[in-house]
Amino acid sequence: MVSLTYGMVGFIQAAGAFFTYFIVMAENGFLPGRLLFIRTQWDSPYINDLEDSYGQQWPYFRRKALEYTCQSAFFAAIVIVQWADLLIAKNRRNSIIEQGFG
């Protein structure tokens, strides 16, 4: 049970959360290849012309807003997968139709 919980389910949760993070970044113009080694430029408040994958320039405050959005999406993905894990663990032997939500 422990290996199932921390092994397979934990891996699926992490993969889903990182997938969500990269989707949010890609929808805002930062493709995964552009995110490599960008941290020092990303966190610098003195760089107000950081270009994304399509050439659009991002000022510091917009980058931070996007970063907070990505962190929120990452957290939401973990919470949603935890809900699914709750239903999986609760209904391991009986189906959800037989047992219900009670």
Image (spheres, rainbow, N blue to C red):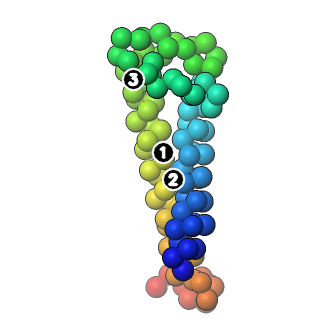
- Side of 64 where 4 appears, left or right: right
User: Residue at position x 50%, y 73% from top?
Assistant: 86
Which percent across, then down, holds residue 32? 62, 31
Q: Which mark is residue 73?
A: 1
* Tag 2: amino acid: Ala
Viewer-closest of 34 and 40? 40
The crowd level at tag 3 (other Cα within 10 Å; few <14, some 14-19, many 20+) is few
Where is mark 2, residue-wise? 77
Looking at the rendered structure, the kind of residue marked 3 is Asp
- Circle 1: is it few (<14), some (14-19), or many (20+) Cα within 10 Å? some
Cβ atoms under marks 1 and 2 closer than 8 Å? yes
Q: In the rendered structure, which disc, 3 or 2, sits on the residue that comes first in sequence?
A: 3
Say which quarter of the image contains residue 72: top left
Compute the Cα span from label 1 to label 3: 20 Å
**Placement of 83 over or under 50, stated as above or below:** below
As shown in the figure, which amino acid type bears the numbered disc 1? Answer: Ala
10 Å crowding of disc 2: few (<14), some (14-19), many (20+): many
**Residue 62 or 34: which is nearer the viewer?**
34
In whole angstroms, how far apart are the C-alphas of marks 1 and 2?
6 Å
Q: Residue at x 55, y 14 (%)?
A: 51
